[in-house]
Structures are given as C-alpha cells and as structure tokens.
C-alpha cells in the first residue's frame, strides 16, 4: 500500500471502531462451556441486533419447524457456535451501515457475497480436520471488508478503478492493483487497527494469493476456494468474468471434493440470498 493511501486511511475521522459486541465475541466468548445466558448478557444492550438474530434464526436459511423466540432458545436449537457466527456477522454489518451504490455492487449484494463466502469457508473447514470451521466462517465473512471500506471512504477512486477495469479489460482485482488501491491492503489496515488475530489479518490480506500468508496459507486457501465458488455460483456480488474454479494445491482437494462443495453451496444459495437480503434491508 502506498504511503499516500495509508495516510488517507489514518486520517478518516469516522472510521468505525470495532463494535463492542464483536470484540467481546471474538476475544472473550471462545469456550464451549459458555452458556446461553452469557450470550444474552453480551448482546442484551443491543435490541436491534437481538431482533435481527431472531429474524435470521427463523428464516428459510435454517428452515426450522419450531419458532426461535429468544437468544437462549437459539443457542439450544442452532448451537452456540452458530449463534456466535450470527452475532459476528450482524454486528459487523451494523458497523458499516452507509449506502454502497456502484456498477454491479450495492451494499446488500456485497454483504450477501461475504455471508456466502463465510458459509462456503465453513464447509471447507468441515472437510479439513486441521482447520476450525467457525474460525473460517469469521475469516470468510471478513475477507472483503476492504472492499466495503473502499465503497464507503474511497468512492471517487473506486469509480476510477471501475473505469480502468472497463477500459483495460481487466478484472476488478487487477484494476485495483494497477491503480494502487487493492482492497486486500485496505482490509488488512482495518484488521490491524481493530487488533484482529494474525490469522484473520493474513487471510484478509492474502485471500487472493494464499501462498503469501505463510503459517496461515491453508486458511487463506480455504477462503480463496470459497470465494471462487461463490463467484462461480453468482451469489451476491460476483465477478462476471469467472471462468473456472481454481483450487490451491495446499488444500489437496480432488475434483469430486470441489463438486461436492459446489453442490452443497448451490443447495443453500436461494436461502442465503433470501434470508440475508431480508435481514439486511429491514
């Protein structure tokens, strides 16, 4: 990242600090023994967040036959980790409530893509014994946070990047790199400012080039593949130039495994889009 871009990021006066709920979930609530009551205590000061969690819990995304009427009940039915993922996702989107309106991109589609990548990353983690599916969910959710920041704080530059993309027949990522404002570096800046874990910072920075993530190459590769699948299936914001799904070698996935992941994600696509669109626009 250029010094000029770094300086501009540092000078953003209204750049959100990490939401209190998100910080507490990421740093304090990491034990299986944490109770539903503790979860309720964390989010009880945010009734809007509570309402959204209950709304998504009762949506087609989960397809439950029993109504979920409380956070404690949600923990019992969905499981603690799943509710934790919802808290992370909804508190994160709540921190960036500004409008995003660019060609091919709007706030709802960008976040739906992020939720889809989070779910796909979790599916990858469920296959690989060495990875934590719920940590990958968080990594997938945050992978494009730099793009959200660009939409909100660098709109003029993003318009120029989109023009550069169209004029040069480039991918959006290539246009960002040529312009000198890659969303991966912008996202890594926020991850560092928010004191997120080294794993999350490296996945955000290297999810398009997993080999650069060092110790966290496998995690970055998992999110890379999840991102590829979501673009190929056109869930939320997506690249129209997606031609084939690339699979990082470090995952050691065969074609059958990738097809299985794509099948599972495709089965969830409509529920992801319908349920999260409803919550994000309410």
Image (spheres, rainbow, N blue to C red):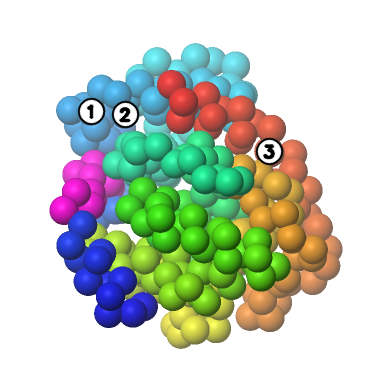
- Residue matched to label 2: 49
Q: CA distance from mark 3 to mark 1?
A: 29 Å
Q: Which residues are magenta?
A: 13-25
Q: Are marks 2 and 3 in contact (CB under 8 Å)?
A: no
- Structural crowding at the residue carrying mark 1, measured as other residues with C-alpha within 10 Å and reported as few (<14), some (14–19) or many (≥20): few
Q: Residue 82, can we see it?
A: no
Mark 3 or 1 closer to N-term?
1
**Placement of the C terminus among the 4 image quadrants:** top left
For mark 3, give the secondary structure: helix
Q: CA distance from mark 2 to mark 3?
A: 24 Å
Classify residue 100 by image quadrant: top left
Q: Position of residue 46 (x, y in %)?
A: 23, 28
Identity of the residue drawn at 66% across and 70% down: 168
Classify residue 21 by image quadrant: top left
Q: Position of residue 254 (x, y in %)?
A: 79, 71
Depicted 154 relative to depicted 179: above or below: above
- Residue matched to label 3: 268
**Closer-to-camera residue (128/106):** 106
For mark 2, give the secondary structure: helix
Q: Are marks 2 and 1 in contact (CB under 8 Å)?
A: yes
Identity of the residue drawn at 73% across and 49% down: 233
Which label was assigned to residue 46?
A: 1
Count every numbered label the image shows and give the total: 3
**Placement of the N terminus among the 4 image quadrants:** bottom left
**Closer-to-camera residue (149/273):** 149
Q: Residue 26, can we see it?
A: yes
Q: Is 62 on the left or on the right of 24, as rendered?
A: right
**Closer-to-camera residue (134/104):** 104
Depicted 113 relative to depicted 131: above or below: above
Q: Is 258 on the left or on the right of 125, as rendered?
A: right
């Amino acid at each position: 990242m250029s010094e000029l871009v770094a300086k501009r990021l540092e000078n953003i006066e209204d750049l959100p600090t990490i939401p209190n709920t998100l910080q507490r979930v990421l740093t304090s609530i990491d034990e299986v023994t944490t109770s539903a009551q503790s979860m309720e205590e964390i989010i009880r000061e945010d009734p809007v967040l509570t309402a959204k969690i209950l709304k998504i819990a009762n949506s087609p995304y989960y397809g439950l036959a029993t109504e979920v009427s409380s956070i404690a009940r949600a923990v019992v039915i969905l499981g603690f980790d799943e509710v934790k993922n919802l808290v992370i996702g909804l508190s994160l989107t709540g921190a960036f409530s500004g409008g995003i309106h660019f060609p091919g991109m709007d706030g709802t589609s960008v976040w739906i893509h992020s939720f889809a990548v989070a779910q796909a990353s979790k599916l990858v983690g469920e296959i690989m014994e060495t990875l934590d599916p719920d940590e990958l969910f968080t990594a997938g959710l945050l992978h494009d946070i730099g793009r959200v920041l660009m939409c909100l704080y660098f709109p003029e530059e993003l318009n120029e990047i989109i023009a550069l993309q169209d004029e040069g027949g480039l991918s959006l990522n290539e246009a960002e790199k040529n312009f000198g404002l890659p969303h991966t570096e912008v996202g890594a800046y926020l991850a560092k400012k928010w004191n997120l874990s080294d794993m999350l910072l490296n996945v955000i920075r290297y999810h398009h080039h997993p080999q650069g993530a060092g110790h966290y190459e496998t995690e970055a590769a998992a999110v890379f593949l999840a991102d590829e699948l979501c673009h190929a299936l056109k869930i939320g914001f997506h690249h129209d130039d997606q031609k084939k799904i690339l699979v990082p070698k470090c995952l050691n996935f065969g074609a059958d495994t990738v097809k299985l992941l794509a099948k599972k994600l495709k089965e969830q696509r409509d529920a992801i889009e319908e349920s999260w669109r409803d919550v994000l626009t309410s």
